[in-house]
Image: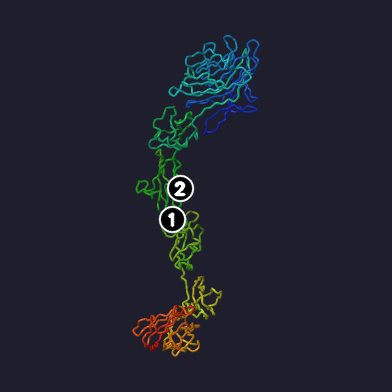
Amino acid sequence: MKKTLPYLFFIFICLYGKLSSQTYQLTGSPVINTTGWDLVSNASATSDFVQLTQDVGNQFGVVKLATPINLKYCDKWKVEFDFRIDGNGTTQYGRGDGFTFWYLSNPPTGFTGGGGLGIPSNANGLMVGFDIFNNTTEGQMSKIHVLYGTNNLPAGNNNIEYNNTAGSTFHSADLNPTQPFVGSAYKHVEVNGEMDAINPNIWHIKIQLDGVVIADQPFTASGGAVGMTTGYFGFSAATGGASARHSIKNAKIYIDKVPILTNTITPFVCVNPATGNGTVDLTSFQNQFVTTPANYQFTYFGPTGTPITNPTNYQYSTGTTNITVVVKDPSSTLCDNGDGKIVLTPSPFAANDVTLTGCDNNNAGGAVFNLTAAALSSVPGSTAVFYNTMYDLNNHLNPITNPSAYLSPAAVIYAQVTTPQGCTDVAQVTLNLFPVVVVQEATLRSCAIETNPSTALFNLTTATVTSQPGTKTYFPSMADAQNGTNAILNFNNYISPNGVVYIKVTNGNGCYSIAKVNLIVIPQVFSNTLEDKIICMEDTTTLDAGPGFTGYEWSTGATTRSITNVSVGTYWVKLKTGNCIATQTVKVYASQQPVITSVDISSTTVTVYVNGGTAPYKYSLDGISWQDSNEFKNMPRGDSHIYVKDAYDCDPVNISIVVPNLINVITPNGDGVNDAIDYSALAGKQNLVFNVFDRYGAKIHQADKSNRYKWDGTVAGRKVPTGSYWYSVSWNENDKKSTPIKYSGWILVKNRD
């Protein structure tokens, strides 16, 4: 180090705010930015680097932070930068001398000879020098020197190249063979500092040059560096008999500490008149420094720097008291932040008179006031006790026991307000009432729903319950309206039987009243005269809905009271009463036709049996002449028609019958005359059965297809004795009803053999 001028301490501050660590930088292109820093003597910044000295003898250059940095609470810091030393040097001595990065309490302010690398005598702090001139041999070298102390040794030659204070210095080997400092290319340096956890006067310093560790060891402060907490970061360089250009760029100094939200808090405090002192809980302000106080550790120091052991009950007196707050994050390696201040300046306490206005909801005669919400004091932690009268307050009688829900008409009450420091004052609290929301009971009537006639569809919004503006909500019960539960959401289309609902009317002040609304279902009105009818299928009739309705609308499209020429079918009519409509259905039935169930023929007498339809029945053989009896005598042999109609006198039903040709005597002698009884003429009828019985009722013959419905007076081939025999013939007519016919009679058999 040959007669070197002070080296540039360069740094451009780029402060990312209180929520990030502090990084001081000197960067920029095409011209480096030196805002916030001091350039001293020959230091200049005209390109993307700071030139501390030119390649000229007897130059001196410094760049340093304009304000000092307090590392008292900083556990770690880091500096990195790029340097270049180039030039031709002098003919006599060559290149020299080098530069120094430092953290000094007394940085250089004027010319310093080259041999000290720009460091003045008696400089106190940390110095890391990059030396290219060997003052002993006056030759070239590349060495790194470290001093954590005072630059005052050896006496008379204050040069860190020769300072060997034990535990406070370091001198590297000559790096010229492997990492020479001189050249056109920039070299990258990292310097890391970490405070010893036990002894704050020991710093562990690690120095790397282009990634190669040069030093990594603890250094103990000596001389004026002992107890030093505040200093200036900077760089310096000087030339003397030897010269070189010294350049720096891309420099960054990291000083990471716990971020805090604010640096200074000035709470309101007062002194108790009775004692002249006050107490305050300093820990109550922690959330103003950090968002989550539980994650941090807080230490408090009084005006003289003495630790405060009872921060939750700190006593102060009149005058201003400054408290230092140190915030530590135990979960990280950030520096403790000692920038916090709590400034206590006692001032007289005066409580605030306030006015509270509440809602006389539902005209209850008063409002429920939350007295605790009254802004009686701006002092955090103040408490208040409320009284109805000043007499009660002065004598501490009858305090209000439910201040958060105090029911009261318009009134004036009083509060005794006490700060956490014990200061008191009386505040007047005026209780006012907003105007009452005026409502009235209403009734809604609506037509019954046809599919569920016990209910109706109501539009609750049409209920006239108030003339005042406000928001309406609808509820099925008074309790729901008061509690704001189970609100009716379909209030425009509310289906309900007879009953009540409640409308809560809330005005712009948030006050409400509740109105009762009666719901009346208008019952359906039907015609008493319109009834179902029965007519003949071929007939028509008249349907009359009767009087008393304001409108009629039939399914036929008619709008008259009655409709005519109505045939069998189902009809409806919409009957209007006022605004309500009831749909009434009426049916016109076809009368049930009588049915001829069977016909008995005995000799020439025909008996007709009928069911269905409506009695009495009428009977006829020609559909013209009618009789009440169902029996016809002296019927001719052969085909006949029988007609039947019921009481509705509709078109008759009729069937065709056959009265068989009756043979009463057979003589089965083979003469071809009356040899057999023969009903084969009925073979085309359905279910034809022909049976012959003896006088004891025993069936002796059954005629069927096999014997062609004949009987020749024999049984099993043998002639029966002469005598009378009974027979019956039954069948179903070939009509739609398959009417059963039964014919019976007797026959005389004469067998002469």
Q: Out of 646 and 301, give the one closest to the viewer.
A: 646
Q: Position of residue 117 (x, y in %)?
A: 57, 16
Label 2: few (<14), some or many (≥20) within 10 Å?
A: few
Q: Which residue is mark 2?
A: 354
**Label placed on residue 548:** none
Sooner in the amino-acid sequence: mark 1 or mark 2? 2
Q: Out of 2 and 141, give the one closest to the viewer.
A: 141
Amino acid at circle 1:
Thr
Cα separation, mark 1 vs mark 2, equals: 33 Å
Q: Position of residue 708 (x, y in %)?
A: 45, 80
Q: Position of residue 476 (x, y in %)?
A: 44, 60
Task: Determine which quarter of the picture holds residue 242.
Answer: top right
Question: In which quadrant is the C terminus drawn?
Answer: bottom left
> Is label 1 or label 2 in front?
1
**Label placed on residue 485:** 1
Question: In which quadrant is the N terminus drawn?
Answer: top right
Residue at screen point 49% across, 73% down: 585
Q: On the rendered structure, is 529 left or right of 50?
A: left
Instruction: Give the structural element (helix, strand or loop) at label 2.
Output: strand
